[in-house]
């Protein structure tokens, strides 16, 4: 299989750098919060796959729901006025959970095309309002919004841009709120004030609010290294967007579905965005699905105008009945105690990892709920990042793996954590203990 993998299977391009030479590590089974590899080694999946298996592996009710739906009706398009029951029921239940008036749900295949869809919806909305010149989009440095061409342009990853003319000329960035190495210092109020000023300045630079369609933010920047904004940051940015009549898009692809505690992180920020994107925990990784939530105002404005305008956007697998059936079963689990367990285990994870703060390699421990990061440094006072060449993240990942723990080892020496919400206390404690063991071995 390793030979066949090398010969034929194209992995995500970002992983070509090391995995291909080492040979693929195959997973063969998974249950709850653990995965087992082809050698029989069982590990705690401290990253829930790719921050997605929130409900845990092998949940019988999810498997049952998918199987039943596959038998009854495996496919129905949403075109031609057709539809099926699971996506209708899922949309209605999601609207109940969504903040404020985000009552309209557009299903996609994952997070990237959910983000792409928000760009289209934003343009349709402003066109419908007679403001087609509002066509500029702003996102954050260190943000991640997908790997599709439009999403990659909003994403702040140079490797996603080089050679593709990205970001496109209508895609702009302002600095992140990242506080550990922020030139503004670490004072939360100063960082928020700086972000507000940077957003206003960027809008001015682009010709004023009459040119700007939307601003994008993740409630916690995930792929940027689990960067938690200061309290009130999201609300302050939302307020600027409301004042200037710029759409605020919250990208909850990682933070949605209990990852930080509540169903959606916007709820704990006390904000209602104009659009919200989600994926990952929506189907908990069992099958692919993403979604865009639209506010009443946005949906109604676009719908009222739809007859008069050229509007076309949809996928073969939009509102897929099997994915929606899985979404409903996963939602039952969240409502039936999983979110509550996630909150308790999240507090335990944060406390446990905070206990590693004195370790000589640890610069900062941060996160919220079941989303956390440990940023490694070689000099705590100078906050010197780990030199990628001397201590490659792949080696830390490999050591953790040998110690029975899957974590994300970002290239810049940040360790990422996003365990399934079904973790037990013993599993959370083991995540912390195995991290300490891995750090000690890294020091040697
Ligand atoms: N937005 C955010 C915040 C994400 O973290 C991701 C994926 N990590 C995406 C969008 C893209 O989602 P997908 O990989 O499902 O296309």
Image: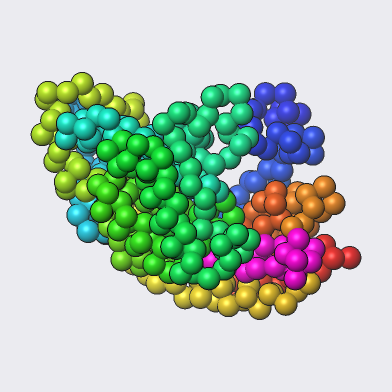
Instruction: Give the answer, above or below, for where 103 lies relative to 334.
Output: above
Can residue 16 be seen here? The reply is yes
Residue 57 in percent (x, y) is at 51, 55
Report the residue that reaches farthest toward the top: 310
Which secondary structure is most common in the magenta stretch? Answer: strand
Image check: 220 left or right of 331? right
Count of numbered badges drawn on the protein = 0
Q: Residue at x 10, y 34 (%)?
A: 304
The quadrant in which the N terminus is found is top right
Would you place residue 218 above or below residue 190 in this image?
A: above
Please say whether residue 374 is one of the residues in the magenta stretch. Answer: yes
Q: Residue at x 32, y 55 (%)?
A: 240
| Residue 206 horizontal side relative to residue 52, left or right | left
Give me the residue at 51% from left, 75% from top: 347
In the image, residue 220 sits, relative to residue 347, either above or below, namely: above
First to last magenta residue range: 362-384
**Looking at the rendering, which quadrant does residue 268 occupy?**
bottom left
Q: Quadrant of the C terminus?
A: bottom right
Residue 305 percent across, percent down from the top left? 13, 30
Instruction: Work out whether residue 341 can be spotted.
Output: no
Say if the magenta span includes residue 358: no
Residue 402 location in percent, x, y? 77, 58
Q: Is residue 386 left or right of residue 9?
A: right
Of residue 236 and residue 157, the one placed in the foreground of this image is 236
Residue 261 image point, x, y percent: 42, 67
Q: Residue, x 78% and y 72% (percent of image)?
A: 360
């Amino acid at each position: 299989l390793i030979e066949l993998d090398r010969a034929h299977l194209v992995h995500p391009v970002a992983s070509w750098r090391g995995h291909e030479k080492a040979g693929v590590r195959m997973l063969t089974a998974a249950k709850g919060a653990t995965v087992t590899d082809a050698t029989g080694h069982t590990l705690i999946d401290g990253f829930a796959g790719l921050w997605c298996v929130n409900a845990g592996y092998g949940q019988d009710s999810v498997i049952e729901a998918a199987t039943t739906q596959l038998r009854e009706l495996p496919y129905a398009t949403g075109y031609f006025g057709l539809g099926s029951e699971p996506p209708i029921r899922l949309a209605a239940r999601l609207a109940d959970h969504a903040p404020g008036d985000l009552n309209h749900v557009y299903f996609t295949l994952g997070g990237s095309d959910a983000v792409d869809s928000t760009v289209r919806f934003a343009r349709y909305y402003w066109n419908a309002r007679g403001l087609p010149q509002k066509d500029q989009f702003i996102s954050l440095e260190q943000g991640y919004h997908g790997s599709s061409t439009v999403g990659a342009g909003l994403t702040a990853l140079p490797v996603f841009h080089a050679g593709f003319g990205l970001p496109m000329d209508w895609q702009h960035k302002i600095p992140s709120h990242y506080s550990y190495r922020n030139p503004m210092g670490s004072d939360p109020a100063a960082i928020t004030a700086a972000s507000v000023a940077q957003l206003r300045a960027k809008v001015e630079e682009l010709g004023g609010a009459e040119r700007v369609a939307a601003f994008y933010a993740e409630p916690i920047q995930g792929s940027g290294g689990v960067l938690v904004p200061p309290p009130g940051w999201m609300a302050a940015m939302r307020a600027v967007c409301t004042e200037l009549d710029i759409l605020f898009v919250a990208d909850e692809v990682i933070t949605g579905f209990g990852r930080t505690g509540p169903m959606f992180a916007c709820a704990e920020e006390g904000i209602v965005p104009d659009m919200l994107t989600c994926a990952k925990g929506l189907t908990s990784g069992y099958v692919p699905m993403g979604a865009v939530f639209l506010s009443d105002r946005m949906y109604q404005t676009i719908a009222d105008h739809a007859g008069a305008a050229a509007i076309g956007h949809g996928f073969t697998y939009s509102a897929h009945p099997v994915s929606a059936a899985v979404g409903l079963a996963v939602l039952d689990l969240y409502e039936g105690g999983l979110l509550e367990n996630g909150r308790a285990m999240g507090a335990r994870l944060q406390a446990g990892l905070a206990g590693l703060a004195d370790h000589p390699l640890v610069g900062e421990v941060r996160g919220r709920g079941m989303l956390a990061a440990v940023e490694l440094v070689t000099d705590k006072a100078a906050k010197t990042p780990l030199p990628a060449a001397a201590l490659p993240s792949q080696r830390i990942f490999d050591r953790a793996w040998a110690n029975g723990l899957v974590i994300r080892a970002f290239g810049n020496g940040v360790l990422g954590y996003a365990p399934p919400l079904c973790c037990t206390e013993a599993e959370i404690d083991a995540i912390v203990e195995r991290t300490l063991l891995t750090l000690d071995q890294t020091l040697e």
